[in-house]
Structure formats: C-alpha cells, structure tokens
Image: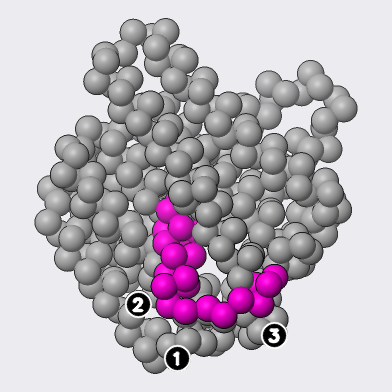
Amino acid sequence: MEEKEFQAKLHKKTEEVTESICTVFHEYLKKQEHMPYVKVVLDGMDYSFMAGGKRLRPLLMRETYRLFAGEEAKETLELQEFMTALEMIHTYSLVHDDLPAMDNDEYRRGKETTWKVYGDGMAVLMGDGLMNSAFELIFSTIQRSVASGKSPEELQRITQCGEMLAVKAGIDGMLGGQVADVEAEKKNLPMDMEKILFIHEKKTAALIETAMGIGATLAGATAMELEKVLQIARRVGIAFQIQDDVLDVIGDSAELGKTVGSDAESGKETYVTLRGLESSRREVEKLSEEAVALLRELPGEHAFLEELILHLIYRKK
C-alpha cells in the first residue's frame, strides 16, 4: 500500500472511530447531568477524553474485529461500547500518569494536562471517574445483551471480553506494570532488562492485547486465532514502548506534544539507557517483523492492519 493511500485510510478510519467512541462517551455523560454537584468531575473527564490522541486502541480493536468479521462488517453497539470503555481506561491512566506524584508532566498532546487545569486532587477523582464509568458501561452492555436474548455463545464472548478488560487493566496488566515502574523510580531501585520488559509488557502491551483480543473475540475468532492475536499485540506493545523510550531521547517536544528528555532528566532507566539507542532500534525492528509474520498467518484481509502496526511502531510522534 502506498504511503499516501495508507495515510488517507488512516485519517478516515481514525475519524470514524473517534466519532463512534465520542458519541457513546457523551451519551454516558448526559445520563449523569442530574447530579450538579459532580459537574466539575464530568467536565474534567470530558476534557481528558477529548484531548485528542491517536485513538490507537479503539482503532486496533475495530480493525482486528474486521479482520475476522470482514472488512465491510458494521460496528455493533457492543464493539462501540468496548472501544469506548477501553479508551476511557487508557485516558484515566494518562491522567494519573501526569500527576505531580507520578511523572509530573504539564503537557500532553500539546495541551495542559488535567491536573494543571483542575488541580492534582481533582485530577485523581477525574481519573477514578473515567475508570469506574468504563466498567459501568461494560456492565450495562452485558445486562442489555442478556435482556435482548443473545445466544449463550454470544453472551460468553461478551463476558469474556469484559473479563479481559478488567484483568489487563488491573494487577496482572497495566496497573501491575505501573506499580513496578513507580516503585523502581521512587525507591531508586536498580533496573535490569527483566524488570523493564515486565513493565513494558504490563504497562503498555496489556491494553494493546486487550484491544486486539476483544476485537477478535467479538468477531468469533477461535481460541488458536485469539492466542496468535495476543502474541502479535504483545510484540506490538513492547515495540511501541521501546520506540517511546527512543523518542524521549531523539524526539521533538513540539512534534510529540509533550516534554522530551524527561526520563534522562529524572535519571530514569529505560530500555534505551540499558541497551543503547541502536540496539533498541534493532529490537523494535525485530519485534515488528515477528508481529507482521504472525499476522500474515491469520485469515482475512490484513493489508491495512499490517501497515497500521508498522506505522505505530515506527512513529515519530
């Protein structure tokens, strides 16, 4: 696929996904308008969610769904709600990441971070609100699916997706990776590759696994196909985070929309500081090649998904 064609498709698909998740998100917020005393939290949730970004995770979920359901398959309401819930969880993690007690970042995506606008205490509550609302949304999805008389197989897939989201956002996923990261940084503990890879796999790859895993599961992928999808996602997630470490060294603040060099300034050890810039780049290339090779073993039309994976891994911002 030519680069110009890919960029046009990416722009169109990202706009479609953004419209879907923002519609579901704002419908949820409207249901909370009867509580005026929490308006500031709802405003902050909206500010954080609407701050932009690549919408990588919902896009990966939808494209993986279409890999198994067909390129022309329409988005189901369940898919839209899972895409939205996952982006809400990702957003809450960024809100908390940026806090003074964590990374102390003042800008993200070219805008002031949530705590800079609303204060750090309120930002904690806004992150909590996004996380809890995501699971409220998924439970309503499950309840509606039961009430609508879906088949046992369909219900099993939907509940499996809900469990996947909860597990990969928790101790055995993103939260666990964040715990290891914060503990190592705050206690100035020595880092080795085993610990860094654990943090990358849990903190970053877990939600990418969730995105692609839920997309495959909702579309009816077999257990073997799902396992292969998770292997792909794990490699993409780790490569994505190593590339993030690389960009922290060589990136441009204006282009990235966030402060660069923060890891070095804080003395934080990363994949790059342990292995060096060139070795890190080679590992990104190796992981991307493995991910693409696994993807090509799956059925369905995957040209765009393959290009998307490579685009995300080799991004410059």
Q: Earlier in the sequence, mark 3 or mark 1?
A: 3
Residue where numbered disc 3 is placed: 265
Which mark, by number, is residue 251?
none
Between residue 23 and residue 251, name the one nearer to us. Answer: 251
Residue 263 appears in view = no
Q: Amino acid at mark 1?
A: Gly
The label shown at residue 284 is 2
Q: CA distance from mark 2 to mark 3?
A: 24 Å
Which secondary structure, mark 2?
helix
Pair 2/1: label in front: 1
x%, y% of residue 35? 81, 22
Mark 2 crowdedness (10 Å alpha carbons): few <14, some 14-19, many ≥20:
many
Residue 37 x %, y %: 87, 27
Which SS does the magenta portion mostly show? helix
The magenta-colored residue range is 185-207
The residue indicated by pointer 1 is: 276
Residue at left 71%, top 63%? 102
Left/right placement of residue 16 relative to residue 160 reads right
- Asked whether 104 or 199 is in front, the reply is 199
Q: Amino acid at mark 3?
A: Glu
